[in-house]
Image: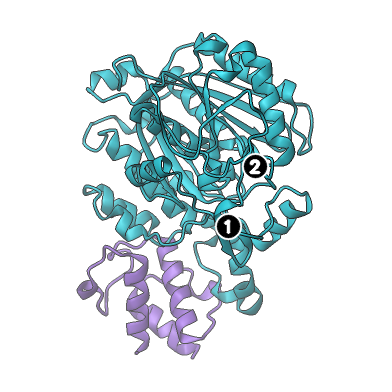
Chain colours: A cyan, B purple
Amino acid sequence: MSTVAVTGTGIVCAIGADVPSFTTALRAGRTGVVGTADGLAAPITWWSFDDAVAGVPEPLRRRAVRAAARAPQPVRAAVAAALQAWTGAGLPGAGIPGDRVGIVVAGHNLTARYTHELYRTWQERPAYLPARFALHVQDTDHVGTLSEVLSATGEGFTVGGASASGNVGIVHAARLVAAGAVDCCVLVGAVTELTPMHHRGFAVLGALAEPGGDPAAACRPFDRDRRGFVPGEAAAALVLEHPAAAARRGAAILATVAGYALGLDANRLADPDAAGQARVIRAALAAAGLAPHEVDYVNAHATGSRLGDETELASLHDVLGAAAGRPWVNATKALTGHCLGSAGVVEAVATVAQLTGGFVHPNPNLDRPIDARIRFAGPGPEPARLRYALSTGFGFGGINTAVVLARTADGG
Amino acid sequence: MTVFEVVKASLVEVVPDVDPASVTAGRTLSDLGCTSIDRAEVVTLAMERLGIVVPISEFRDVNDLDRIVELLRTHM
């Protein structure tokens, strides 16, 4: 399979408003999980759009302010993350024709809290419904706004796959580039904002970690005392380019998307299946031309769910066999919370940071691992020279994904 | 705040790159860089700030500042 280059990354989440601060938090194993009125969460709180775009070169900054300053928070965060990736990739002024630039937004049901918060106004004073409601209430508001800011006129759309949406986005953005439909694709994993109704809905399924004790210790992937996931908020972005196009403009390649796979379980439930997961992991490794012993690092889906974490380890043992103890394994969700629609992109940004930075981030709450045969990262960061990383993503309704990211041979 | 000032403040909020000094009586919203959706947003914000309701059908085709101000006044 032809590889696709990652030339830019961006993120706005509970533990960092850009890639450098996020990377520092990763190294430190700092968690963004706090107690909120709706329960445990890792929200984006202190963040300001105006500050986020203040350093963006003109005329991009003005376009961003005009298009997004009054948009709902998920769209503002998406624009900020995309601009980090775009400027990091050296694209402002690079002269790529607009019709060679695509936009893929990963995630769905992105406007639930916007609607929920407007509902009281609507009931009391319907005439004051914001005039942009019909635009902002659609998930594709992200696509339109990003395309306006970046002057992109190539292909663009949203993709959905529940908690696997981010990886589904990577698959489709990489395909657009590999197929030659665009030279450059901006992929944004969008913020999934939950409402109290959603918290209740996940809680009744037994999926959520309930409040109690230290919030920082509540999200415990792969630990014997794990008790469910903690929702997190993040917008994360990747710029994907054809390696030849990136080379032509002299862009630094941070990593490559070396393989991926997506498959369903023929199952509508929240019922993970190790065989279905193993199938996509095996297929992604095969697409990258990798043997099990060549995987250096696994950024696990690992939400902290009792059944989910166990199932994922079973699928890793199935695929990696005797090599299962070799790669480092960590769970970014212990730090960021489970960012749902954007999780796969958040974890790709974290993986690229670790591949390029030569470390694996800690598993701060992994006191009593459920599997002694796996090489879990410990309470502190581990220096590690990583070449090949596997990032998994599994969603309700049996949506299984796996992506292989590789550090480039020149060490970049 | 006069009705004009309320409309002006709403417009400057919706279209951040407009020069507030250029928002004067006699100008049209399209001159000032507003799209039709910006116009609907400006009118809705102004209605909310003034605590009045103007039926959508009445401001659908109104584009100049003076007529917007006049329309809002008739509903106060």
Q: Nearest the camera: A204 or A85?
A: A204
Disc on the earlier residue, 1 or 2: 1
**Taking A290 as reference, is A320 left or right?**
right
The disc placed on residue A215 is: 1
- The answer to whether any part of residue B6 appears in the image is yes
Q: Which residue: 52% across, 37% down?
A: A157
Q: Nearest the camera: A227 or B57?
A: A227
Q: In which quarter of the image is the C terminus of chain A?
A: top left
The disc placed on residue A248 is: none
* Whole-percent x, y for residue A122 in the image: 62, 72
Which residue bears the numbered disc 2? A304
| Location of residue A16 with respect to A6 vertically, above or below | below
* Whole-percent x, y for residue A384 in the image: 40, 25
Q: Which residue: 39% across, 48% down?
A: A79
Amino acid carrying mark 1 in the image = Pro
Pointer 1 with pointer 2, Cβ within 8 A? no
Q: Give the letter of the chain under mark 1.
A: A
**Taking A254 as reference, is A204 left or right?**
right
**Taking A248 as reference, is A13 left or right?**
right
User: In the structure shown, which secondary structural element does the residue marked by tag 1 occupy?
Assistant: helix
- The answer to whether any part of residue A185 appears in the image is no
Q: Which residue: 72% across, 51% down?
A: A202
Cα separation between marks 1 and 2: 14 Å
**Taking A75 as reference, is A39 left or right?**
right
